[in-house]
């Protein structure tokens, strides 16, 4: 445990919302907040950060304004600044290795938006070794965290210990319920020859999925007996099932394979859908 939460700043309203979210989480974790801004120099041999130069002025201002906004609300929170002349992706991944949690801003989704994270956000999501939270803006700093339940997308086809540990621990720390969502396609035997579905087969498949989810969550409910847990089994594709169950969520938690399998992308369609279209902050947790 590094006892540090890092937030990446770029001067946008989204990153300021991310900073407020990270600040509140740092207080709950009794952790230090690191305010990180990274940029590349426009010309070789230009002055380094800290010098009184134009290239260093805006980075310092971005961090200073974020620090002032956070201190106005949470003066007791320990913070540190980190200004780095480095490729932002490399700087964020390096900071992630020295953090327990990485927090970034994410542009607001709209019907015309196809990708709202940007290239850096997508790359960080794919390669960060620690949980990474994406926060949208504009939001009231007091409503960007710990409001509503924690929703976790459950996968029963691969180990997801880190995913469930993060979700249950967050729900316990926030003192809110946890909603575990399992989306599952109908089995082939549920369809009749006319193209419709057999109600009994649907009920049987749903009952089996409910039992599997209950068994998967049983040890976690024993470990976190004070966390109310709601099971949400949806007989549909996992991605829309997750989004349908996250309308009132304060945080949506999804998993990403930490070790990529051959011929498979590091980010699946469920993570893409959650990060691009969820109405709340999204935590992407790497797991085996």
Image: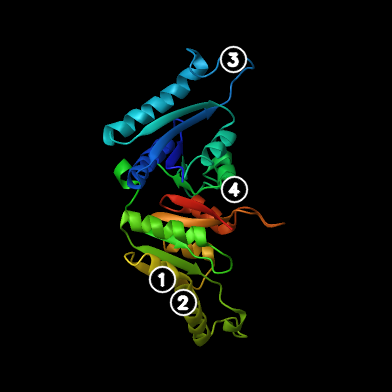
Q: Does the CB distance between marks 3 and 1 fall below 8 Å?
A: no
**Label 1, label 2: how many angstroms apart (C-alpha)?**
8 Å
Tell me which numbered mark, 1 or 2, is placed earlier along the sequence: 2
State whether residue 275 is above or below residue 154: above
Secondary structure found at label 4: helix
Tell me which numbered mark, 2 or 3, is placed earlier along the sequence: 3
Tell me which numbered mark, 4 or 3, is placed earlier along the sequence: 3
166 left or right of 237 in image: left
Question: How many numbered tags mark residues here?
Answer: 4
245 left or right of 212 in image: left
Q: Nearer the viewer, residue 14 or 53?
A: 53
Among all residues in the image, which is located at the extreme right? 263
**Label 3, label 1: how many angstroms apart (C-alpha)?**
56 Å
Label 1: few (<14), some or many (≥20) within 10 Å? some
Query: Who's the residue at 36% across and 30% down the image?
Result: 67
Q: Which residue is mark 4?
A: 126
**Label 4, label 1: how many angstroms apart (C-alpha)?**
28 Å
Query: Who's the residue at 47% across and 73% down the image?
Result: 213
* Mark sitting on residue 231: 1
Tell me which numbered mark, 4 or 2, is placed earlier along the sequence: 4
Residue 136 in sight: yes
Label 2: few (<14), some or many (≥20) within 10 Å? some
Tell me which numbered mark, 3 or 1, is placed earlier along the sequence: 3
Q: Which residue is mark 2?
A: 210
**Label 4, label 2: how many angstroms apart (C-alpha)?**
30 Å
Residue 247 in sight: no
Residue 90 picture quarter? top right
């Amino acid at each position: 445990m590094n006892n540090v939460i890092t937030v990446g700043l770029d001067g946008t309203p989204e990153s300021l919302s991310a900073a407020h979210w990270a600040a509140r989480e740092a207080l709950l974790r009794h952790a230090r907040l690191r305010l990180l801004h990274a940029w590349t120099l426009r010309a070789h041999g230009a002055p380094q950060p800290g010098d009184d130069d134009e290239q260093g002025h805006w980075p310092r201002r971005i961090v200073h304004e974020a620090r002032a906004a956070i201190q106005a609300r949470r003066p007791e929170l320990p913070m540190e600044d980190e200004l780095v002349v480095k490729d932002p992706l490399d700087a964020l991944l390096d900071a992630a290795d020295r953090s327990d949690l990485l927090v970034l801003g994410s542009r607001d989704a709209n019907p015309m938006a196809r990708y709202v994270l940007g290239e850096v956000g997508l790359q960080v999501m794919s390669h960060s070794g620690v949980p990474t939270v994406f926060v949208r803006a504009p939001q009231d700093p007091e409503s960007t965290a710990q409001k509503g339940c924690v929703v976790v997308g459950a996968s029963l086809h691969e180990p997801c210990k880190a995913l469930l540990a993060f979700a249950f621990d967050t729900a316990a720390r926030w003192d809110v319920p946890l909603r575990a969502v399992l989306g599952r396609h109908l089995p082939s035997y549920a369809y009749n020859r006319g193209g419709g579905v057999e109600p009994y087969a649907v009920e049987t498949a749903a009952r089996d999925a409910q039992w599997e989810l209950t068994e998967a969550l049983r040890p976690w409910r024993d470990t976190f007996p004070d966390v109310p847990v709601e099971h949400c089994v949806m007989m549909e594709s996992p991605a829309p099932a997750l989004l349908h169950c996250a309308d009132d969520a304060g945080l949506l938690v999804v998993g990403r394979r930490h070790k990529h399998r051959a011929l498979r992308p590091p980010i699946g369609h469920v993570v893409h859908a959650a990060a691009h279209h969820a109405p709340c902050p999204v935590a992407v947790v790497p797991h085996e």
